[in-house]
Image (cartoon, rainbow, N blue to C red):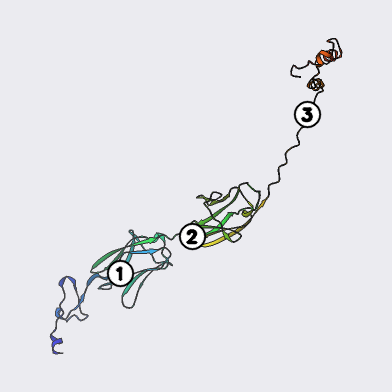
Amino acid sequence: QHNSEHARLQVPTSQVRSRSSSRGDVNDQDAIQEKFYPPRFIQVPENMSIDEGRFCRMDFKVSGLPAPDVSWYLNGRPVQSDDLHKMIVSEKGLHSLIFEVVRASDAGAYACVARNRAGEATFTVQLDVLAKEHKRAPMFIYKPQSKKVLEGDSVKLECQISAIPPPKLFWKRNNEMVQFNTDRISLYQDNTGRVTLLIKDVNKKDAGWYTVSAVNEAGVTTCNTRLDVTARPNQTLPAPKQLRVRPTFSKYLALNGRGLDVKQAFNPEGEFQRLAAQSGLYESEEL
């Protein structure tokens, strides 16, 4: 107690303001003196990288007398409290800027400014928002159609699938995985989601129920189609066309084969010459 009676408050002259007593007869030594301390950040957050759609908070502590007012700026523009952005102060003096749901527009450089009568202080922090990958489960734009083909022909089972990210495809025939990249069976897919299963030189073993499944991180879709293979009908050769033979005097050839000289047996003025003249036919030298 003795010491407290003689103790004197040590205050920098630049931060002291005298306030006069309500009694006019009180001298300056008994005047009430107020202390002012400029803001000073005791704890500040580090730069952050947050996934889009997640919760985020920036915590900091600031000292100063009187208690400083705090303002936030994003890329030079004031940050306002709303449903997704809140500025709170705990009982222990911990300040927080809270993001209920981080959006892509929240990314940028944040400046926190604390002000009071004695001055102001500032710190900056960078918030990077990692864009959320939009995902969509596979869906068929059009499905493969059932087909009926002949043995030995080629056939295409075609469909188009939309999905983000692009899906993995699985083809089955009668619940057994189809082997691709062979001489007969190939699978083609383009950037638009069009899918083609090509089967060359189709045989009876290729017939059955085909199932195509598309799978990605967002979901799966499946579709069934039928392939029927029929035997190629037997090809019958057309009946040979009957030739109409014009009658000739080939009987003379048969007689000559027996050693008879038919020419010499007839008079040139005979029946043979008369018939030949009427028909316009002349006997071949080969007969």
Name the mark on residue 243: 3
State left or right for residue 47 relative to residue 190: left
Q: Earlier in the sequence, mark 3 or mark 1?
A: 1
Residue at 54% x, 62% y is: 220
**Tag 1's secondary structure?**
strand
Looking at this view, name the residue that lies furthest to the top. 269
Q: Amino acid at mark 3?
A: Leu
Mark 3 to mark 1 CA distance (whole Å)? 118 Å
Q: Which residue is mark 2?
A: 135
State left or right for residue 257 relative to residue 18: right
Spot occupied by residue 79 in the image (x, y as percentages of width and height) = 36, 63
Query: Front-most of 195 and 186?
Result: 186
Query: Front-most of 166 and 283?
Result: 283
Q: Amino acid at mark 1?
A: Asp
Spot occupied by residue 98 in the image (x, y as percentages of width and height) = 38, 69
Residue at 39% x, 61% y is: 130
Q: Which residue is mark 1?
A: 69
State left or right for residue 208 relative to residue 100: right
User: Label 1 near label 3: C-beta < 8 Å?
Assistant: no
**Tag 2's secondary structure?**
loop
